[in-house]
Image (cartoon, rainbow, N blue to C red):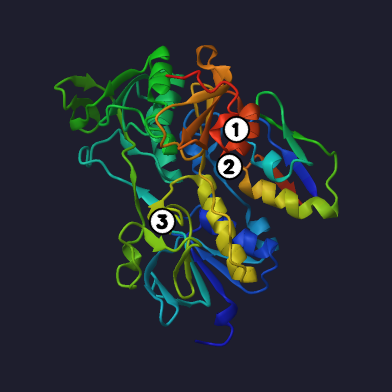
Amino acid sequence: MPSGARSEVLIVGASVAGLSTAGTLRDEGFPGGITMIGDEDALPYGRPPLSKQILSGEWPIDESALCTPAELDRLGIRLVRGTAAVSLDPSERVVTTASGDDMRYGTLVVATGASARRPPYGDGLGGVHCLRTRADATALRADLATARHAVVAGAGVLGSEIAAGLRKLGLAVTLVGRSPELRLAQAGALLSPLIARLHREHGVDLRLGEEVVALRGADRVSAARLSGGDVIETDLVVAAIGCVPNTGWLSSSGLDVSNGVVCDSAGRAAPGVFAAGDVAAWTDPATGIPARVGHQLNAAEQAQIVARTIATGAVPTAQPVPFFWSELFGTKIQVFGRCDGVSLDTIAGDTSSGRFVAAVQRDGVVTGIVGWNMPRDFRIARERVGRPAEGLDRSRQRVH
Amino acid sequence: MDVTVNKPACVGAGQCALVAGELFDQDDDGIVIMLKPTIGPSDEATVRRAATLCPARAIRIAE
């Protein structure tokens, strides 16, 4: 290794996880070189607004930017844009880029994120979209001007957000979900009845337990056929059917990429190699199972842990607790912790008023908190996670 | 350090109030409130941490 490369941190991926790693390294006083490479031409940007304020047109696309060139300069972070990594040799500590450059490093942080899963229909047909990147958002916005009816495929939170955003713009919306329930991040199907009610109240045609099987149209989509047999006339289809971790460039690296980049509970994938964000599967120390978590805050928190480990050598003790939020039809939904329980016990507000905070418990311990249009109470209630459930004030008022 | 909060962008996640409760709070709708009119040198690292954790990037720092 050439002298100097030992103190060099190379970050592959220039979105939230990559940028948070770089920023936290400087906050922690890391004095060495920091280079970040990203395959997109845009400055680092956040994804959450793409399906919210940018889809609805409230924000121009540039509002999604996470930093300016001046901020990167001030922090001494070198950003190489429009450059994809194509391979990694962890024993030689070198990453090769699409343009054939070899980039040597002392420590590597893999933060290449995930890509939208492409639907098996609509190839080459106009009006068919995914929504994952800034370019996706721009293309979808451009097609909205002439669209009257949209079919949104996907029972997850992104599908729900897109459906809500398109309704807000006045389109007729059919939301198609293969799963019989609407899923919301780590709350799973727990909130499905409440979310379904929101959609129906706002005029979304909800088709759960069905999927889009084929599209019709000459140049642009004109109809979607569902598995139940119905044909829906539509001039826009948005598929939000999941994402796949961007690990193709690591296939010859020897790293375990069986489900994203498999890491220990502190983000270490191999000597001198860390991974953070949507591409990473950190091992849960409680269960021993590696899992990917696809939310922005998780990406930022994992990045901070990795950066602190690199800068200080300190072994992290706290695991990031999953936190997730969304906004559907003006309703602010927040989920903190793990919500694989079977019931919600309200601890503030009530569901009939459309404002509540509820706890999820398992084996007598609060494992998660759900907030529904009560952000301040939600934040205060977060302290209950990990505590005995007996403390619940109104523990028998079930949400559903 | 010049710190501004973009209230329309705020999603009420409360990360700022959680990590820097002496500098940030939330109103009843969960929207960020700055508790100090100016940020002194001793608070700068805390503000940076709050800004990094803000999922909406609603806390902006200009130096």
Residue at mark 3: A279
**Dot 1: element:** loop
Question: Residue A199: x and y, percent?
Answer: 40, 19
Give the residue pinned by disc 2.
Answer: B55
Q: Which numbered circle lies on residue B11?
A: 1
**In the image, what residue type sits under mark 1?**
Val
What's the distance in space between the residues labelled 3 and 2, CA to CA?
18 Å
Label disc, if present, on residue A178 of the rendered structure = none
Amino acid tagged 3: Val
Residue at position x 48%, y 58% in the image: A276
Taking A137 as reference, is A334 left or right? Answer: right
Q: Could one spot residue A394 in this view of the protein?
A: yes
Q: Are marks 3 and 1 on the same chain?
A: no
Decide: is A119 above or below A23: above
The residue type indicated by label 2 comes to Pro
Q: Chain of mark 3?
A: A
Q: Residue at x 53, y 77 (%)?
A: A106
**Mark 3 to mark 1: distance in Å?**
25 Å
Instruction: Say which label, 1 or 2, has the lower sequence index.
Output: 1
Q: Please tell me whether residue A237 is drawn above or below residue A88 in the rendered image.
A: above
Decide if residue A150 is on the left or right side of residue B39: left
